[in-house]
Image (tube, helix red, strand yellow):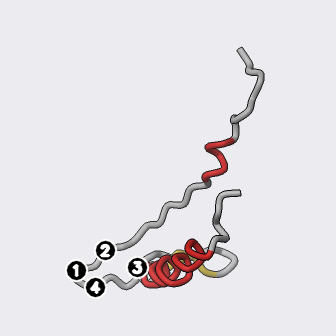
Amino acid sequence: MDGHEHDDIMGYRNKVFLPAITRFETLMARHEGPELKKIMPEIHEGQCQVIIQYHDECCFHANDEVQSLWL
């Protein structure tokens, strides 16, 4: 539907996006174990902690084609 399986999109994801995310993960806090203990990254001079924010595009289409509304 949205073209996420096209060859150029998959190539970008596998060759550019995923390697970049892998490099950024070294600068992100992570959570381990069943108690989800927060492990902070080791930040060196000149580096910044990375906090990734995800969003779900499907929510933008949640009310498309709605023919009624509550007043």
Report how far apart the C-alphas of labels 1 and 4 lie in the structure: 6 Å
Task: Categorize mark 3 by other alpha carbons within 10 Å: few (<14), some (14-19), many (20+).
Answer: some
Dots 1, 4 in contact, CB < 8 A: yes
Q: Is residue 8 left or right of residue 23?
A: right
**Residue farthest top in this picture:** 71
From the image, tell me which residue sits under label 2.
48
**Secondary structure of the residue carrying numbered label 1:** loop
Q: Amino acid at mark 4?
A: His
From the image, tell me which residue sits under label 3.
27
Report how far apart the C-alphas of labels 4 and 2 lie in the structure: 8 Å
**Secondary structure of the residue carrying numbered label 4:** loop
**Residue farthest right in this picture:** 68
**Residue farthest left in this picture:** 46
- Residue 49 percent coordinates (x, y): 36, 73
Dots 3, 2 in contact, CB < 8 A: yes
From the image, tell me which residue sits under label 1.
46
Counting residues from the start of the chain, the first of labels 3 and 2 encountered is 3
Q: Amino acid at mark 3?
A: Leu
Report how far apart the C-alphas of labels 1 and 3 lie in the structure: 12 Å
Task: Categorize mark 4 by other alpha carbons within 10 Å: few (<14), some (14-19), many (20+).
Answer: few
As drawn, 6 above or below 59: below
Report how far apart the C-alphas of labels 1 and 2 lie in the structure: 7 Å
From the image, tell me which residue sits under label 4.
44
Q: Amino acid at mark 1?
A: Gly
Report how far apart the C-alphas of labels 4 and 3 lie in the structure: 10 Å
Q: Amino acid at mark 2?
A: Cys
Counting residues from the start of the chain, the first of labels 1 and 3 encountered is 3
